[in-house]
Amino acid sequence: MSKWQRFWKQAQLTIGFTVMVFVIILVAIFITFTMIFLLAKLGVIGYYEENRVPLLFFAIISLIVGTVISLIVSKVPLRPIRKVMKAVDQVADGDYTVRLDLNGPQEVRELCDKFNHMAKELQSVELLRSDFVGNFSHEFKTPIVSIRGFARALKWEDLSDTERNEYLDIIISESERLSELSTNVLSLSKLEQQTILTGKKQCNISEEIRLSIAMLEQKWADKNISFRFDTNEVSLLGSDELLRQVWINLLDNAIKFSPEGGEICIDIQSSQESQVVSISNPSPPMTDETLTHLFDKFYQGDHSHATRGNGLGLAIAKRIIELHGGNVSAHYISGKAVFTVTFFVE
């Protein structure tokens, strides 16, 4: 917004305030003269024709003086409003760092606090959006660049059959990675827009976890990983399809970061108030910052990218758990990464 537009908006506010005061004074004078006229007609007070001119003159002078005074002093009550208008214009222009510091009545201070809270939230959302776009672009660009590079290499005539097959395997692998990334982005977008979980039914948590382990057999068998899972049958009211995605994502993460020959432990505790599922695995050390951001979109604790992933699996799992009214947390205890999922009994 230009300086002229801002000046005109402030001028409109002053003019509007002055007109409002003018109308109030005019109405007050009209009511006063009407009362005098009625009381004189009823004989309550004396009224003479020679008093009409001085009274009218006094009314006009009062109207002019009152209007001029209101125009002069309007800057004081309108100053907080002008500051709010200026701050709103800055936010509208994309500046979310602006903050208000207003003194005055309780209502003005509350308005100031609410505006600052809104600006802070918008700033956080903008940072998340920027990070999301940046990470999204990076995660998509990496496999695309890899596919393009090896596809061009396949045109070389001096490639051996071994090299050609190796390049084709890389292209297939990166294509699958790109497909998985697209699927996860769409799934997370859909889950974030969903607020109510429909089609609930009793789901056997223990059975779903066993099924998820079986579906991931190739991954844990390649690393010679074992499982310790001894629990009673526990059921939960929810979506079995979505919950299975939670267990697959959490177990896949545990397998990914477990060393060769490691053991993944699964424990389920059930009570009248809640059902708690804990999945722990041997893990490289994790800092508090890593634990804080583990469930953020596109965040990868392994910054070296030595392990394959796109940083969406845990974000998807968290959203599904929240849709079931539960919560999930991560801790690093005695050389193990421990993920704890809590569902509250309805």
Image (cartoon, rainbow, N blue to C red):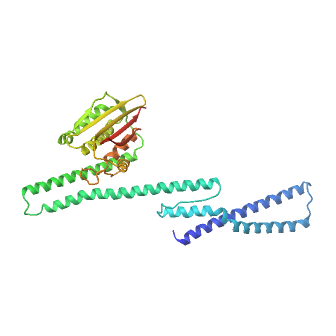
Query: In this image, 115 relative to 253: left or right?
Result: right
Question: Whole-percent x and y of residue 120?
Answer: 49, 56
Question: Whole-percent x and y of residue 176?
Answer: 22, 50
Foreground: 18 or 297?
297
Q: Residue at x 79, y 66 (%)?
A: 62
Q: In the figure, residue 125 lies in which quadrant?
A: bottom left
Count of numbered marks? 0
Residue at the far bottom in the pictured view:
4
Q: In the figure, residue 280 lies in which quadrant?
A: top left
Q: Residue at x 30, y 29 (%)?
A: 231
Foreground: 300 or 157?
300
Query: In this image, 128 relative to 258: left or right?
Result: right
Is 178 above or below relative to 85? Answer: above
Q: In the figure, residue 138 lies in which quadrant?
A: bottom left
Question: Whole-percent x and y of residue 87?
Answer: 54, 62
> Looking at the figure, which quarter contains the C terminus?
top left
Foreground: 114 or 230?
230
Foreground: 294 or 16?
294
Question: Whole-percent x and y of residue 54?
Answer: 87, 68
